[in-house]
Structures are given as structure tokens and as C-alpha cells.
Image: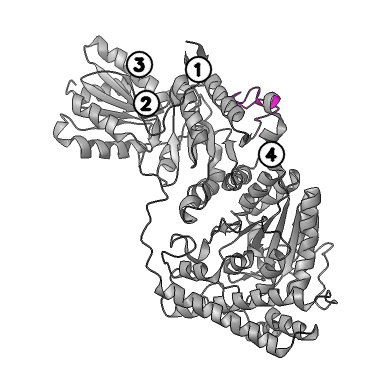
Amino acid sequence: MPVISYREALNQAMREEMEHDPNVFIMGEEVGHYNGAYKVTQGLLQRFSERRVVDTPIAEMGFAGIGVGAAMVGLRPIIEFMTFNFSLVAIDQIINNAAKIYQMSGGQFHVPIVFRGPSGPAVQVSSQHSQSFESFYAHVPGLKVVMPSTAYDAKGLLKSAIRDDNPVVFMEGETLYGMTGEVPAEEYTLPLGKGDVKRAGTHVTLVAWSRMVHTCLDAAKVLAADGIEAEVVDPRTLRPLDTELIVTSVKKTGRCVIVEVGWPMAGFGAEVAYRVQRGCLDHLDAPIERVTSDDVPMPYAKNLEDEVQPQVKDVVAAVRRTLYLD
Amino acid sequence: MVAIPMKTPETARVELHDELPSTTVEELAPLYRQMLAIRRLEEASAKAYSQGKIGGFLHLIIGQEAVCTGAIAALRPDDYVVATYREHGHAYAKGVPARPILAELYGKKTGLVRGLGGSMHLFDKATNFLGGYGIVGGHVPIAAGAAFASKYRGDGRVTLCFFGEGASTIGGFAEGLSLAALWKLPIVLICENNQYSMGTPLYRSLAVEDVSLRALAHGMPRDRFDGDDVIKVKRRIAEAVERARETGEPTLVEVITYRFRGHSMSDPGLYRTKDEVEEWRRRDPLNRCRARLVEVGMDEAALTALEDDVKAEIEDAVRFAEDSPAADDYLSYVEKV
């Protein structure tokens, strides 16, 4: 099986869907002539021309809204935010329009649109460029929220997101673009709303998405050295959430640690914790643990930035607490 | 805050007393009928609201009927219309019947959007009415998006986007205008300047009195005129529609108008003098239209018949709304999570 990068997997997904459906187009800042700020759209302009790979001025609210309007009348826009930090100036279009129109129009107008781009802290880009807004978007009925952690998932899920008749917020890991993985040469899609067990284990369930899946996998290796087998569950889609997959795992292990790079207060992990206690109360052998970033805007200095975010040692410590080992 | 006299550069033409374009009974009578139906529909809504049968916000367009009626008369049926929360008239003018509009206001199952949107969110796919939007200015990019799709497909359609002058100060308008100009989208942006954004007059909102000036910064054609005469509105908007259809060039059009009622039903309008309101009521576009119809040769008997027909249509819509079953489904149009 070919090994390609997460970035290349996303590129393939868009390229294939644009070949497959003339209504699919991509729009955003630097997506065309510059080949993408993160090179995710590399080569698409040459293949599909300016008609379908549309460079925009810096106007997120404007071009996100143009995407919504175009989607209402049958096109299938992919709107790239250079980062999801910039989606905040377009959030009116995403929440008040994209998420509402299908319901508000009594089912007359679908909005088949994908808002995609990098999300989460990168490296030393400080507070305004290091945010994780999945909890914002996952709060909103009418949206789907997808956060793939591997190249394989990224391609299969993006293809499904583009084919979905309703708005999808597709948040890519900013630090995952260069990560490689096996991706089949033949076409495939992955269903939205279905999670994946990234590592099987028996003693504790780690729930994580996007980059934190890899932090958990690293933590699982450390724990394995002490004979602790962690199961790593990646929901891949936060909304709709594959609650069944998580609950099934926790029923087996009796312990649950939820790891997210977002802030603790009202973070998505709190919703997961609610669902786990609701579904697994009689199976839980310890309180559910959450590992999150600290409750602060992201600092710039590398040592401080690392300290703020969940690290392998934080996950290991949380797991050990659920096992009453420390 | 002190009001400072405005210095407006190169203000576009507003001919409040210019010569009216010629017309015929055949052209004008259907437009008068639409304007009258919109007026009666709004009056019926106000009555039902005061009886507690309509809830939430209710923004009436009484006094401004000539703008939506005249503008939409310049369109083809496959053209798109995007409007604000003051949009009952626009929906009706685009061809949505009174029955489902009123039933929607009543929150009934038979409502245009099944009781899910209410007064502010009428949508109708069948007539290409792309909605009423409640966030000021946020719909301007959506309208530009519909126009973008027309350009993408080369389908020759034009989009009309209506908004109040109060939207001219918010980012959605600025970005929508800017992108429409940059990409030459086939759209006509129509500012229905009713002179008050809620209770704030334009001179306390904008540094210039001419909203259409905003087009200059984008090299976009513009027009500016009063909206008292429905035929004048139709002719002037038709120029912009044809420009959009033929060349893909957008236009910003400012139409000066006036709402006789408050911003919404809960607004007594204390920020305006009685004299000011009376002066505008004397210019009532509906009365002017009726007088014009007599001038161009429609006789009283025919006018009375038309008016009786409108009365019956709206009475029927009220009965329909009253008798319809309550809305009963709010789950079918969202994903289960």
C-alpha cells in the first residue's frame, strides 16, 4: 500500500472529488496560485483552472458566505480557512447561516459545504494562532465536525464530507500535515460519525482525536512497559459522536481518560465524560479523568508552550490515577 | 452626541419630483394588485399579532411596498431573491402565495417553512426565493454566493439582494459588496433606505447621507432614487438587472423609502415626529399607484373589482392560517447526534 502524507491524502481527496463532480470547487486565501498556505491544495489550480480553484482576498466572512449561497443553489463548495483561528470572523456564516438554513427553510434548501483548514496549536505561533475550536462547532446543531488523526482517515473522511448534503466543519491537525501513513491506491470513503480503535487494550480507555491520538499512542507505549494496556479510541467525528464505540470500550476496561488539546472549561471532553458515565456507570472502577491544555491563552516561549499542552507524561499520570497506582 | 452637518461628495441623483415613466394599465394593474395584497397581508398580520396569534418579532413593510414589488417585477422567474427579516412583501412579490406566508407567521404546519422559521425566515425553493435572514448584513455574502453559482454555471440568472441602510455599516455588507465587484458577479444590491435602522436615523449611523457612494470604492455602477413610484423602481432596477445579465457587472442601488409603522410591532416609533410620518403618508406609494392607474385609463369599476379580489384573497389566507393544524415537527431537518 502506498505511504503518503496527511497533506497529500487531503489533496487526493479533493482532487478525486473534483474529478468526480463538476459542482465541487475550492475557495480560500492562497489556495490557487500560491498552492495553499500549507500546500494542501498543491497542483489543483493547474489541474482545474481558476474557475474551480478560487483565490480570495482576505475576507473570511465574505467568502464563507459566498460558499453558503452557492451551496444553497446546488454547488458543493470547499471553503479553506488558512487556519481555523480565522474562522472566527466567519462564524456568523457558519453558525447563523450554514448550520440553520436546512432546518430554517423547512427542509427546502440543503447546504452541502465543507469548511476545512488546519486547527489546533502549531509550534510557537502564540495565542491568536494556537486555538482549538472544535468545542465551539460541536455545540451547534446543523453542523458536523470531523477531526482526522491519520492520512488514511483524512482522505476517506474528507471525501465523505464533500459528498455530504449538509455543512461539515473539517478540522485538520496543523502539525499532522507531514505525518505519513498507508493509504490505499484504490478509491474509498469512510463514514462520518464512526470512530476507530487505534490501539486495542484492556486496562484503560483513552479517548482522543486529531494530534492527541498520537500523544495517547505514545503514552500507551510508556504504559505498556509497566504492563498497562491502554485502548486508544479515536472518534474521528465529534459530531455526530460515535458514543457506542467509546461506551463499548469503557465497559470493557472500566476506566476512561479523555485527552484534548483544547481548554478545560466546557471542552468537548466534558461531553464525552457525560456520555461515558451515562453509559458505563456500573462498569466504572475509577472517576473519569480529563487531560486538557491549561486554562490560559497559549504562550509563545517553547518551554511554556509545551507546559501548557497535554504531554505524554500527563496522559500517563492520569492513567495511573485511574488505576490507583500513585 | 452632537449631529454634525454632513459633507457628501458627488451625491448620486435623487429626483423626488421628476417626471414619471410612462406605463399602461396592463403593466401597472398587476403591480398595484401585488402592492395592495402586500399591504393587506401586513395589516392582517398586525391584527393577528395584536390578538396574540402571531408571536416573536414582526417587521412590517407598510409604506415600502413599491420597492420590492417594482424591483422583483424586473426579474425573470428563475432569478434569485435574497432578503432580510422584513421580507413578507418580497416573498409575495416573488410569487409565494399569501396562504403559506400567513400560516408560517401563525406557526402552523402548513406554513411556508413548516412553522420552523416564522416571520423572519421565509424561504421558497419553487419561486427561487432564497430566504429571509435575521442577522443584519449577513445575507449579502449569501446573495453574492447565489450570483457566484450563476456565473460558475453560466446560467444567465441574476440575484437581487435587499437590505436596509442599517446594513451598510456592517462587515457582511462590505465584504459581499467587495467580492461581488472583484469577481463581477451578476447581482443587484438594493438598499431599501427607509431612513431609520430601528430607531437610529442615517445621519447618526453613517458619515455620508448617500449609501450608494460605497460603490465608488469598488468601481461598481450605482444608482439612487426615491421608491414612491412602482414603475420607476421597476425601470431603474431593470437597467441594473440587464447590466448584470449581459455583462456580469453588479450594481449598488439605493432606493429612498419610508416605513409607516415602527421597526417591529413593539416599536411605537417615538424617535420620529408625527409631522414627518404624516408627510410620508401623504406620498403613500399605494395611493399614488392607484391614482396613476386612473390616469392611464383604468375605470373605477375595474379597480373596485381588483380590490375586492385582493380582500377576498387575504381573508382566505387568514382563514387558512387560523384553521391549519399546529406545527408538529422540529426534528426532521437536523442530523441526529
Q: Tag 1: residue type?
A: Glu
Which of marks 2 and 1 precedes in the sequence? 1
Residue wearing tag 3:
A218
Compared with A111, B23 (above or below) is below
- Kindly identify the residue that appears in the image at 41 percent across and 64 percent down: B109
Near-viewer residue (B17 or B66): B66
Structural distance between the alpha carbons of marks 2 and 3: 12 Å
Structural distance between the alpha carbons of marks 3 and 4: 41 Å
Marks 3/1 in contact by CB < 8 Å: the verdict is: no
Mark 3 or 1: in front is: 1
Is residue A120 rendered to the left or right of residue B336?
A: right
**Number of the label disc, if any, that sits on residue A186:** 1
Residue wearing tag 4:
A57
Q: Tag 3: residue type?
A: Asp
The picture places residue B323, in percent across and down from the top left corner, at 40, 74
Q: Quadrant of the N terminus of chain B?
A: bottom right
**Number of the label disc, if any, that sits on residue A310:** 2
Chain for disc number 3: A
Which class describes the residues within 10 Å of circle 1: few (<14), some (14-19), or many (20+)? few
